[in-house]
Structure formats: structure tokens, C-alpha cells
Image (spheres, rainbow, N blue to C red):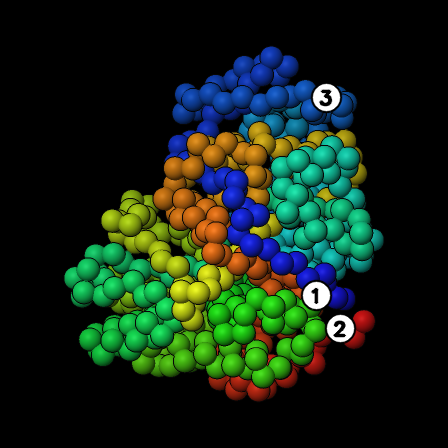
Amino acid sequence: MAHTSHRRTAMAFASIVAVSLSVAGCGSSDDGGDTTADAGAKSTIDCAPYKTFGELKGKEVSVYTSITAPEDAPHIASYKPFEDCTGIKIKYEGSKEFEAQLPVRVKGGNAPDIAYLPQPGLLKTMVETGKVIPAPPETVANVDKNMPDWKNYGTVDGKFYAAALGANVKSFVWYSPSAFKDKGYEIPKTWDELMTLTEKIATDNPDAKPWCAGIESGDATGWPATDWVEDVMLRTAGADVYDKWTNHEIPFNDPQVATALAEVGKILKNPKYVNGGFGDVKTIASTSFQDAGQPILDDGGCYMHRQASFYAANWPEGTKVAEDGDVWAFYLPAKDDSTHPVLGGGEFVAAFADRPEVKAFQTYLSSVEWANERAKTCGSGGCVTANKNADASLLKNPVDKLSAEQLTDKSATFRFDASDLMPGAVGSGTFWKGMTNWITGQDDKATLDYIENSWPKS
């Protein structure tokens, strides 16, 4: 189950759009009527593209996804113009057990109409069941126009199935600007500076820890630890070796992977450095990823938390997320200023039914109209999309501005999350489980050998 190597620089994302803090209005158009949102604002949607699918009023489309509260509400709100325009009802279901339960549902004949797959590797696995429907021509046309750089990730064996939905940056470290200022800590510019800062924080603050972390995520437990390895792999081995690792052109237990895991272990398995606000190293495995960064707000419970841009949605209501706010994020530094690796990910819209209303919804989600509506409904951030033609003036949320800066930095080298590109049995299976076992005490060699031995033979 090899995957084609994709080399991406951040310039491919120069027009990626993010979001605003405002609440969206309902859709309106000459074709679909004029409706006003609860907030009193208005936005427009062109209903004409969906008329080609026929009479849709009263139809329903079920959506199954790993996007849960609090990140689900802005997603659901972004469908309202489409619902108003077409008369289709979107039935949304988010689950922390998505990756484990989707294959069970598909095998049992209970597949959703639409699933948001966070891993291209899982898409390949689902396509192999024979149950995924190729994307309709209208969706393909939107992808070719709006997100061509992401088309390969939704393609399996030369056939296009799934348009990209959201996009995120993972190479961030969350921190408290006021805590750093009070202690005189500077934002590190290199990996060595980051490690020096880590040691200084540990020495200066015996009642706190430099880092807090959590990898519990229901049936998806372990994925935040894989992100750590991927980010560090890009920094220690470089993008070319990262690509070979992703495609199994080098084994999972290659010495270069072992080097990256050992570097991660200098932080995550060091009781002097983790797990502020929760306990010892092993508590990382039982701490939910949503809760993991919260001690940053607790007067020095911990000082740093490595997590993606979408973590912005997990801070308590009223938290100011900004450079001069309660929390902010800095780029996870590379070895030196000569390289700028950026790890990212996203979701892909796969259909398990070919009814007209399902095709219409796929087409909407690949449109500029949806990308703009997503921006308007976003709220607390984490709403960058892969659509390069969306309205860039909607880029008002500080976190999403920060993400776009990383994605469009001329010196940046972008790579998609490796576990998401690997075969599902590995990327959302043994890699997650192996890293969980590693946190709870399994050694480096046993962990890497376990994952390597699980790689599909064909």
C-alpha cells in the first residue's frame, strides 16, 4: 500500500484562506430566497450550481466525522445557507471513536452518506472496501479550480474520490505571553534554544514543569504523540527522508526514525520536563488532548504545549488568544534558521452514497461559497481551509493569520502529516497504539519494531 511522494512548499498555499471571529448569516440568493440569520447578518450563496441535481427539498444527508465539540458548532453553522438554498437537511454526527467506528459501520452496511476522513491513508483503506463513491464531476471541477495542490491526497489509484475540507498547521507551541514576560523567557529560534529554555524553566520553577501533554482521544488515543515524532523527524532527518519514511521506502525502525523518537523522548519521557498540572510521564497517556494545554493558564502549572492550530478552539470561553493575550503560539523551531519545516494536515470529504443530494453537498463543500461561510462561522480559530480562492479579507482570527503566515512563508517546506498518509492499519492503528505504549513505558526499539512489523506486505 505505497503512497506517492508529495513534495510541497508552503508557496503552494499562498492563497489559503482562514477565518473571522464573526457569526455567519444565513444564505440568500435570487434563486433560493432571502433569509436572515439569528445574528441579523446576511451572506449570499449562489443556488444555481445545485439546481442541476434536481428537486432536493425534504432530502437528508448524514455526515460522520471526528470533529466534535466545541469545534463542531461552527461547522454545522456553515451548512445553513446550503440547507436554506436547497431544502436539504444535514444530519451531523461527531465522534471521538470515528477512525475505529467508520470501518465497522461500512462493513456492517451502515455507512454514513458523507464522512470527513482526517487521513488520506484511511481514505485508501475505505476505497478498498468498494463502498466509496468517486466524486461527481461538479466537485472535481471545483477542486481543479479551488484546491489543485490537494487533489492528489484525495486520489486513489488514479481515481479522484475526496475533496479537501479543512487545513491546519501542527508545528506550534502554545504558551502564556505574560508568564514568559514575567520570567524573562525569550521565544526560541532554534531547537537547541528550545531545549535550553526547557531546562531553564525546569530549574527556575520546581513546582511546575516546562511542558504539559496529553494523547488520550478515545479510540484515537495516541495521535498527538505521532505528531511529535513527525515534527521532530522533519527537523532531524529532513523532508526527503521524511517522504521516504512516509512511503515505507525506509523501514519504520530505521536509525533515522530512532533518532527522532529519542529526541522526542528527551522531552516527553523526562519526568523533570513533563507533565505539568497532571502528574508523571505516564499521565500523558490518560490526559485528553483537549485538556492537555490548560495548565498553561494556571499560573505556571506548565509553560509550553505542542499542538496544532485547531487547539485554539479548546481554550475556555473568554480566553484571549493573541500575541498580547492569555495564550499564544510560536513556531516549533527547526535545527537552525536555514530550514523551516511545517507539518500540517486536513480532512477529506468521502461519499458512501451517490444520491443527488449527497453529490450536491459534496459540491457545496468544495466551493468558494462554503469556504467563505466557514470563515464567517468560525469563532475561535482553527478554520483555515484548503480553498485558495476563498475571500482572503476574511482572515481576521489571530490564530488563523498565524497559520497562514507559516503556510505562505517563502522559506517553509510543507509536509502533510505522515501518519495520515500511511496505510490505515499503521497510521491510525499501530503508530497510535505504539506511541501510547511508549509513553507508558515501552522502550524505543520495541515501539519502532512493533510498528514496522505491522506494515502491510502488499
Identify the mark nearer the N-term, 1 or 2: 1
Residue extending furthest right? 130
Give the spatial CA distance, label 2 vs label 3.
44 Å
The amino acid marked with disc number 2 is Pro
Residue 423 x/y as whole percent: 70, 65
The amino acid marked with disc number 3 is Lys
Residue 194 visible in the picture: yes
Q: Could you tell me which residue is drawn at 73 percent across and 38 percent down?
A: 140
Total of numbered circles in the picture? 3
Residue extending furthest left? 182
The residue pinned by badge 2 equals 456
Q: Could you tell me which residue is drawn at 48 percent across and 70 percent down?
A: 235
Give the spatial CA distance, label 3 vs label 1.
38 Å
Residue 432 x/y as whole percent: 58, 70
Circle 2 sits in a helix, a strand or a loop, which is it? loop
The residue pinned by badge 1 equals 423
Q: Could you tell me which residue is drawn at 49 percent across and 62 percent down?
A: 341
The residue pinned by badge 3 equals 51
> Badges 1 and 2: C-beta atoms under 8 Å apart?
yes
Label 2 crowd bin: few (<14), some (14–19), many (20+), radius 10 Å: few
